[in-house]
Image (cartoon, rainbow, N blue to C red):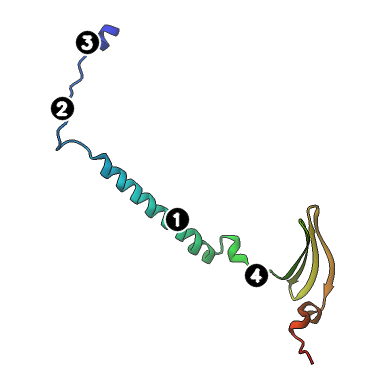
Amino acid sequence: MISLLLTSAVATEMATPEGAVDFTWLFVKMVGLLVVVCVLAIIFLKYVLPRLGVTRGGQRGRFFKVHGRYQLEARKSLYVVEVGGRYLVIGCADHGIKLITELSPEEAMGDRGHKTQ
């Protein structure tokens, strides 16, 4: 069996400049197409998906709005959040989120709506 493999001849042709494949040009085309595909993917992910509402970015501001944040410690913060016209003060830490109090719209806006005399 080994003798059959060794004695069987494979027809080969000498390489000529006309028949040779230019791998440099193929590589340049491949890199160019890769750049085009990446640019199209970035445009699709950045502009098309948010307009369709598929990503979370399309939901931003629809249900609630964060009006302020106060950092207490490295992983502990207070937030003033507007949810359905109600202003809530919530505390966030590693172990969870807790409602602290509800504010009136005047309290939540603080000095923004008041004129100083």
Are the two marked residues, 3 and 2, in contact with CB atoms closer than 8 angstroms?
no
The numbered mark, 3 or 2, whose residue comes first in the sequence reads 3
- Judging by the rendered image, the residue that carries numbered circle 3 is 7
How far apart are the two marked residues, 3 and 2, measured between alpha carbons?
20 Å
Question: Residue 100: horizontal and vertical position, in percent?
Answer: 85, 66
Are the two marked residues, 2 and 4, in contact with CB atoms closer than 8 angstroms?
no
Q: Quadrant of residue 104?
A: bottom right
- Judging by the rendered image, the residue that carries numbered circle 2 is 14
- Judging by the rendered image, the residue that carries numbered circle 4 is 62
Name the kind of residue labelled 2 in the image. Met
Name the kind of residue labelled 1 in the image. Ala
User: In the image, which is nearer the foreground, mark 2 or mark 1?
Assistant: 2
**Label 1 residue SS:** helix
The numbered mark, 4 or 1, whose residue comes first in the sequence reads 1
Are the two marked residues, 2 and 1, in contact with CB atoms closer than 8 angstroms?
no
The numbered mark, 4 or 3, whose residue comes first in the sequence reads 3
Q: Quadrant of residue 101?
A: bottom right
- Judging by the rendered image, the residue that carries numbered circle 1 is 41
